[in-house]
Amino acid sequence: MAKREPRKRKLNNFYARSAPEGLTWDTALPGLALRVQGKARSYVLVYRFNKEPRWIKVGNALQITDKDARKLARKMQVRIAEGYDPGAEKRAERGGSTFAEVYERYLEQHAKKRNRSWAQSHRIVARRLLPRWAKLPIKSIARKDVRNLIGGIDKPIAANQTLAAASAIFSWAEKRELIENNPARKVERNPTQSRERILSDGELPLVWPALSTPLRVTLLTGQRPGEVAHMRWQDIESGWWTMPGRPVDGWPGTKNGQTHRVWLPVAVQAILNELNHGELSGFVFDTGNGPPKELHGVMRQVCKTLGITQKVTPHDLRRTHGTMITRREWGRDAMNRIQNHREGGIADVYDQHKYADENKRIMEDVAARLLALAEGKAEASNVVPLKTV
């Protein structure tokens, strides 16, 4: 039997009232069709989302014109191109969307666009939430369900991370009126001990020889480990490292989205000079496959090799640098300024240049002190920073 050719024509109001059963495709707008099922006559939009064919009702063909149908369908197509799934949105409005469907929308419309650590959260959701809730209507998930799930996770930190991931999804759904209330709200977090620490003066000479180059630069500059790992040659000029606030060419952007300018101490410049072979662009610490991705793994190996039981993280190196700034009596404001702990704004841009000379002195003083301790030079304990009047 020969395959029946799809029925096509330019849809109009008269045809919508007299069309036969089945689908008639509009030649004026690809994807738009008139569907007749018994007495029901509807304009529908057929589209693909995540490579899967889907459709959504545009409107009652007896109540809207063909021109209105095309106008509405075009708006839907624009939203689809932006990553929205209008079909899932309609199902959610009817209360029929599952947790998995809402999570898919949250991931594409929000997390991937606004959360740089979305992949880490996605692994938690895939491992702990989707196996339990994927097929459940999201409106059916109650606070007791959240408590039961979180209570079944025996590791406190993992439980807290899972609760945070769930709450973010439910909050997003609540703001879009897909659910009435966030069921993760008021679910108690597990108490945990802070693992934040700094390296003591006695630990520095033990750890320093085992640190990788990116970790040494993290300690001597006090910048975020992930930003150090993504350091690029084109952002370094005359000893100053300028970090663009927004992502560009492999650079992830700063945490607060504000461009940050920091002086690289002489000790760090010496390290970089050994790595540079005439490069003008690209990652400073290129592994051959992009910037280093597992600084935490390197730090864990350092601790294991040295037998350090109170684990040290890459961020602890940054914290050690920040603490040294205040120990050297440069003040907390200087620490916040140098480590980019600020809200951002045009005043911050001016401050980068206003405090340039002082920031340079601070960076050299702190790096010299840390390096002296790391290399076991006791006489460095007598170094007094040169303050400005």
Image: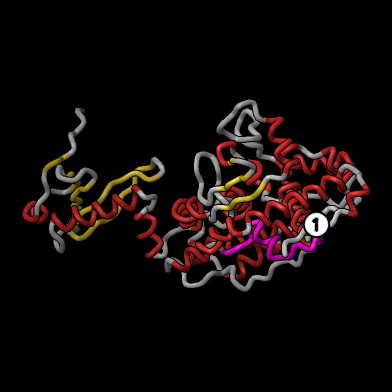
Residue found at the far left of this picture: 14
Q: Quadrant of the C terminus?
A: bottom right
> Does residue 106 belong to the magenta stretch?
no
Mark 1: amino acid: Pro
Count the marks: how many?
1
Q: Position of residue 44 (x, y in %)?
A: 24, 52
* Residue on which disc 1 sits: 385
Residue displayed at 42% across by 68% down: 177
Up-down relation of residue 308 to residue 323 (above or below): above
Asked if one can make out residue 196 in the rendered structure from this viewpoint, the answer is no
Q: What residue span does the magenta drawing correspond to?
A: 327-343
Dot 1: element? loop
Q: Position of residue 211 (x, y in %)?
A: 79, 39
Q: Mark 1: give few (<14), some (14-19) or many (20+) Cα within 10 Å.
A: some
Query: For this view, does 111 lie left or right of residue 70?
Result: right
Q: Position of residue 180 (x, y in %)?
A: 47, 72
Closer to us: 172 or 86 = 172
Query: For this view, does 189 lie left or right of residue 194?
Result: left
> Does residue 328 belong to the magenta stretch?
yes
Closer to us: 174 or 5 = 174
Q: Quadrant of the N terminus?
A: top left
Q: How is the image coloured?
A: secondary structure
Q: Position of residue 77 (x, y in %)?
A: 29, 50
Residue found at the far right of this picture: 378
Asked if one can make out residue 2 in the rendered structure from this viewpoint, the answer is yes
Residue found at the far top of this picture: 277
Q: Quadrant of residue 175?
A: bottom left
Residue displayed at 39% across by 56% down: 88
